[in-house]
Amino acid sequence: MYLLFGLYLFFLFLILLYNLLQLNLLFNYIGKKKVDLPPMDRDSLPMVTIQLPLYNEPYVAERLIDNIVTMDYPRDRFEIQILDDSTDDTTGLCEKKAEFYRSQGLDIQLIHRTDRSGYKAGALAAGLLQAKGEFIAIFDADFLPNKYFLQNTIPHFQDKEVGVVQTRWTHLNDDYSMFTKLQALQLNVHFTIEQIGRKSGNHFLQFNGTAGIWRKRAIDDAGGWRADTLTEDLDLSYRAQLKSWKIVYLEDVEAPAELPVEMNGIKSQQFRWMKGGAENARRLSPMILRSDLKLVTKFHALAHLFSSSIFVAVLMIALTSVALLPFLDNLQIDTHFLGVSLLGMIGVATVYFYANINLLAKPCSLKDILALVFYFPLLLTMSMGLSFHNTVAVIEGFLGIKSSFVRTPKYSIVGHLRHKNAREQRNPISNNLIIEGLLTLVFCAGLLMSVRTHEYSFFIFHLMLALGFGTVFIFSWRDR
């Protein structure tokens, strides 16, 4: 009993620490300095290689290429590499597009691999061997940057210490469903407060894998792309910063992209991010600790790398809270604070509202603010429902268990419209899906136990868990 209570308090402390770190990033964000665009003569713009890594993307590949060729940049100073590892019709579609635009004088080539070794990292590395550009811009299949993207980013490389320029993701289909809305609200926090907060505090931040530009020399100096992690972008970001390369983050330069619309698509993306974060925490932590970085920078770097572990803490608190229910009377302490302390996530709530209200059109309407209030508990509930799935990913990452890079399916969705031929990806029933269903029943049992024992300290928490796991289970089953 006391061991369970101790575990509960330990993981509750970890969540409290996470909240405090989020608040610290918010304070840094509020004190941010504006990043000015250095003037640069159009005639002195450097050569840029634009890489488009693709794998089985028949619904968005043509849209991406049509968008990229419109870049407002001297045609003799950028090339396009279509890095295609596809095993479906995507390759033929891309080859036709490349041939069409080559006939119009554009430098565009298809680099097709048949073995997919190294997944996305392998494709980027293969393209880099043939790249003519001094700078490498990368866009995933579902991104649609505006034509001034290169003009708004390349001038920042006049600072010879800048190795990366990253821009803010925005969303093509955030109003498609409740799930896309919640994803957008969560990503908005990362692409405002977390990125700018880390930069303003002189801490490490990251290249997000797409919608950014690398200095080719920085990639080489940091050791190049490595395929031994599912988040090669985070890995290279940290190795480059350990080599003293700077990352510039441009909050005002937007890169619209498509959010996953299926629960299994959301889960595959989350799995990569969580497992990759844990892999890099295991691999990079010794390098961070041995470095000559300031102590506070080391602390924030480690907190960033281990941030995916917050889902482990949430799941452990959830399970221990159910196990504690029959013994609460025997603890001989006032337990009313237990449920309140977890739900009163002041740090996360403050960061969420500040980030998303800040992105609303001004002046903000009462309707928009009330919508954010409505969505916040739903976002917490969905995050709780994903805690088991993400915990599995984190544990696999820490244990070094290898898995393939599973793509997140995209369907050329803008607003409520999708590609006319788009069909959902089918997934088999997995053991994890069955466990999620069983956990739904566990937390429902916790609710019944609260009613029978008249002990309601965890009632709201268990209600959110039951709804979260139930929703994830039902929609994962539906999307099979």
Image: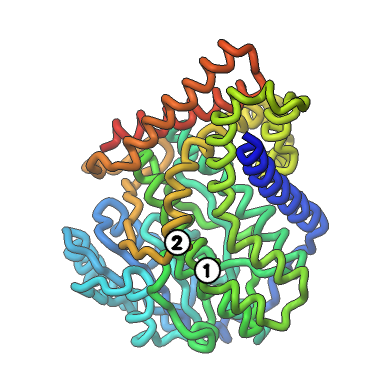
**Which residue is denoted by mark 1 in the rendering?**
282
Quadrant location, the C terminus: top left
Mark with earlier residue (2, 1) = 1
Image position, residue 259 (x, y; %): 44, 46
CA neighbours of label 1 inside 10 A, class few (<14), some (14 to 19), many (20+)? some
- The numbered disc on residue 112 is none
Quadrant location, the N terminus: top right
**Which residue is denoted by mark 2 in the rendering?**
397
**Of residues 270 and 423, which is closer to you in this image?**
270
Q: Secondary structure at mark 1?
A: helix
Residue at image position (43%, 50%) is: 392
**Of residues 186 and 272, which is closer to you in this image?**
272
Asked if labels 1 and 2 touch by Cβ distance under 8 angstroms, the answer is yes
Residue at image position (49%, 74%) is: 73
CA neighbours of label 2 inside 10 A, class few (<14), some (14 to 19), many (20+)? many
Q: Secondary structure at mark 2?
A: helix
Image position, residue 334 (x, y; %): 77, 25
Q: Is residue 105 left or right of residue 40?
A: left
Q: CA distance from mark 2 to mark 1?
A: 8 Å
Q: Is residue 40 visible?
A: no
Identify the image quadrant of residue 86.
Answer: bottom left
Q: Is residue 381 positioned above or below 422 on the image?
A: above
In this view, which residue lies farthest toward the right? 31
Q: Identity of the amino acid at label 1?
A: Arg
Q: Is residue 381 left or right of residue 75?
A: right
Image position, residue 18 (x, y; %): 68, 50
Q: Is residue 115 positioned above or below 87 on the image?
A: below
Q: Identity of the amino acid at label 2?
A: Gly
Residue at image position (42%, 77%) is: 226
